[in-house]
Structure formats: structure tokens, C-alpha cells
Amino acid sequence: MTELAQVAPAFIEMAHRIVWAGVASVDSHGRPRTRILHPIWQWDGTRLRGWIATRPTAVKRAHLAAHPYLSVNYWEPSHDTCVAECRAALCLDLETRQMVWDLFAQGPAPVGYEPRTVPGWGDPAADTFAALRLEPWRLRVFPGSVLLGQGGTILTWQEDE
């Protein structure tokens, strides 16, 4: 198994290049639901953490209450894929919402964007705005070149159990 310090930067490079991810949760009946979301990732050299600016809908709240885990899957036409299997928590405190708002507003293109452009999100204190924290327990970075027989390396990291 590869060390997190090797996988996390490769994961961020690919995820931030692809930008949009299929994010799957599981409801209280064990049924999956996938949505397309726009995470941003932070790596401090020892810990990888992801953030999603989102609406705190009843469905998201119920899914996270039943199963506080998400699968975050990126794919692009070159067949580059990367996946983060994560513990997830909806953060509603204003300090965290402000931090996530600023992270996106000040983030580099193409992953950064102005949150005010999202209808209903006038500012981080809006009731329709929340931050979803992602703490990966498993990562996989799979360059499309490997799939196409053109070389490359698949990187995988998993938290010690």
C-alpha cells in the first residue's frame, strides 16, 4: 500500500483538474443515491480533507444520519479516474461555512468559483448554504494511460484499520 503523502498530491492534482465528481451516499434503507458535486481538497502534508459547498437538504441530512460515508468518484474522457471513500459530516456552524465559502471564492481555477453565483447563496450565513466535510479513509488514483496500456502507475492508499 502506498503512503498517503504520495497519493494525496496526485489525487488532488487529478480531482482539481476534473472538478466535478459523482458523489454517492446510502439512504436508511441501504439504497445508493448519486449526485454530481464540486469538492475542493486541502492537503497539509499529513492530512487530506475535502469540502463541498452544498445545500443542507432533508435528503442529504437523512442519508448522512443513517450512513455518514460518501464515495467521491471523478472521471474524464481520457479515462483518468480517482476515488475518495470518505467519512462525511454536514457542518452548519458559521465559522466553518465562512472558511469553505472563502476556500472556493479564493480557490484556483477551475476548482475555485464565486459562491454568490449559486442561486440562494447570498452569503455563508444563508440557511440554504452548508459545508460538507470529507475525511478520506481510502484513495485511488488511476491514470487512464494504465487502462489503455500506455504505462503509468495506479496509486492506492487506505487508512490503517
Image: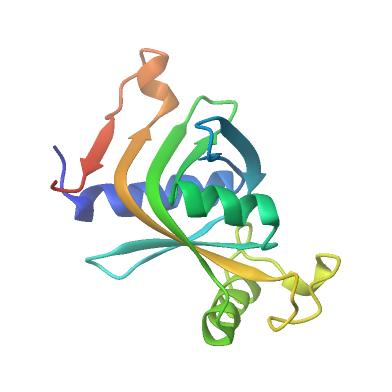
| Residue in front for this viewpoint, 152 or 131 | 131
The percent position of residue 69, horizontal first and vertical second, equals 42, 47
Q: Residue at x 50, y 54 (%)?
A: 65
Q: Is residue 73 above or below residue 131?
A: above
Q: Residue furthest right?
A: 119
The percent position of residue 30, horizontal first and vertical second, equals 50, 32
Q: What colour scheme does the image use?
A: rainbow
The percent position of residue 3, horizontal first and vertical second, equals 16, 48
Number of numbered discs on residues: 0
Q: Is residue 44 above or below residue 122?
A: above
Q: Residue at x 13, y 37 (%)?
A: 1
Quarter assignment of residue 128: bottom right
Q: Residue furthest top?
A: 149
Q: Is residue 139 above or below residue 128?
A: above
Q: Residue furthest bottom?
A: 95
Q: Residue at x 65, y 42 (%)?
A: 36
Left or right of 10 on screen, residue 31: right
Left or right of 118 on screen, residue 43: left
Question: Quick check: can you spot residue 38?
Answer: no
Question: Quick check: can you spot residue 34?
Answer: yes
Q: Is residue 123 above or below residue 80?
A: below
Left or right of 57 on screen, residue 88: left
The percent position of residue 104, horizontal first and vertical second, equals 61, 70
